[in-house]
Image (tube, rainbow, N blue to C red):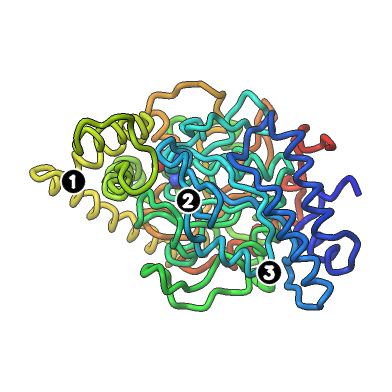
Amino acid sequence: MTDLHRLSIRELSEGLAGSKFSSRELTEHYLKRIAKIDAQVQSYVTVTPEQALAQADAADALRKSGMANVLTGVPVAHKDIFCTHGIKTTAGSKILDNFISPYDATVVAKGKVAGLVTLGKVNMDEFAMGSTSESSYFGATKNPWALDHVPGGSSGGSAAAVAADLAPFATGTDTGGSIRQPASFCGLTGLKPTYGRVSRFGMIAYASSLDQGGPMARSAEDCAYLMNVMAGHDERDSTSVNIDADDYVANLNGTSVKGLRIGIPKQYFNVAGLDADVKARVEESLKKLEDMGATLVEIDLNMTDAYVPTYYLIAPAEASSNLQRFDGVRYGYRCENPVDLTDLYKRSRSEGFGPEVQRRILIGTYALSAGYYDAYYVKAQKVRRLIQQDFLKAFESVDVIAAPSAPTTAYKIGASLDPVEMYLGDIYTIAVNLAGLPAINAPVGFDKDQLPVGLQLIGNYWSESQLLSVVHQYQQATDWHTKRAAIAEENA
Ligand code: GLN
């Protein structure tokens, strides 16, 4: 079969169960596509063909013995922020260029239990800091829709791999938009779960109170399958919540759009810098949801102006603390010929970290330093609570909140936005992380340059099933999620 990469996760699961193809055939098919097409997209940092084929054969054997699960033998790509036993895990950084983890992240381990076949590790902004994937030490990943554009970030490799049909779905992480924004830039569906829903064990920390893993795929249905694997309590992550995860696939038709109250924040649609095409596509998608029976309700989110400054104090503060562990001593990059311990720390870190990571460590260290701590960090934490309360108040009168995922479509590679311009592009995604809420991106059309536009729906705590279900209903009634970039049409 030449078109295995066109099948949805449900079709892959049914095809494997019905012996239409084996996991080995499917895995070889994807590996061939990666070998032929990924030189143009550069979504993978590491491809693991031998391990993938061994896992595929094991999956096929399990299938023969009647012991297979729904996803046994389905391939996946993991963001290179999830630790993988025996396979390099770089977080997009020179400082971890030689790091081979002695254990699997819980998300990776759960994937193995479910029978997923790991194709490899995909590219990302260094330590997930960025919105373009250009800050990766391993070079920029390209947007499959326009190779001279970025795929977004930080989970740009995950997005590009799925959009180019180099993986049927992928894991991502979202600290301030890193699942939703690249999903938006690459025409995919991506879910950022409620904080605590997916284990962070073995997921290299950027800002621990904001980080959350989640699925990236073509459709809400495909995301639901991966969410069933990723979600759940984990004793090894103290912030993981001890509430049973839903069956997201079974719940796909659980929420009707009819009668759904969708909040439209006044402040969000008047943001300077909101692209006219993005605004138009998002409004058309909301009109469609209205036609399907939803009610649009104007709401106030008064704290909008505080999002960017608050996030860009808290995230770097936590990052400066988390990244102290990379010191060149026990693992990771070490500078040549250190003269003493201080020299070893200094040079290993200044040679090993890229400029954006260094900038954030400096901002974060400053915000946490004695004398500035109350004025910056503590103040930001207080404002963070006000942002959360703003959302909770809105959820008293609406079921979900709609927004663009990003004010623009994908940037040109090398557009060299200054850091503040880049940070402002996160306006629609970061408040969700500050409040710990779940949110989803769904593709809703294209701009004048044929670049994808995304709609974001934000839900109340633990409403992942509802968000997936609403997007699933929308995708039953529209076909934006079925559109393919030209490069994805290429056969290997
Ligand atoms: N662009 C945001 C940042 O640079 C969000 C990144 C993320 O979610 N990991 O921090």
The front one of 454 and 122 is 122
According to the image, label 2 marks what residue? Answer: 174
- Coordinates of residue 192 in the picture (x, y in percent): 52, 56
Please name the amino acid that badge 1 sits on.
Leu
Please name the amino acid that badge 2 sits on.
Asp
Mark 3 or mark 2, which is nearer the start of the sequence? 2
Q: Residue at x 79, y 64 (%)?
A: 13
According to the image, label 3 marks what residue? Answer: 249
Q: Tell me the crowding category of disc 1: few under 14, some 14 to 19, or many 20 or more residues within 10 angstroms, Cα based.
A: many
Q: Is mark 2 within 8 Å of ligand 1?
A: yes
Mark 1 or mark 2, which is nearer the start of the sequence? 2
Q: Which disc number belongs to residue 342?
A: none
CB under 8 Å between discs 2 and 1:
no
- What element does badge 3 sit on? loop
Q: Quadrant of residue 385?
A: bottom left
- What element does badge 2 sit on? loop
The front one of 402 and 248 is 248
Q: Quadrant of residue 130?
A: top left
- Coordinates of residue 235 in the picture (x, y in percent): 42, 74
In the shown orientation, is residue 492 left or right of residue 151? right
Q: Residue at x 68, y 45 (%)?
A: 162
> Which one is closest to the eye, mark 1 or mark 3?
1
Residue 306 in sight here? no
Q: CA distance from mark 1 to mark 3?
A: 43 Å
Q: Quadrant of residue 427?
A: top left
- What element does badge 1 sit on? helix
Q: Which disc number belongs to residue 368?
A: 1
Q: Residue at x 80, y 71 (%)?
A: 63
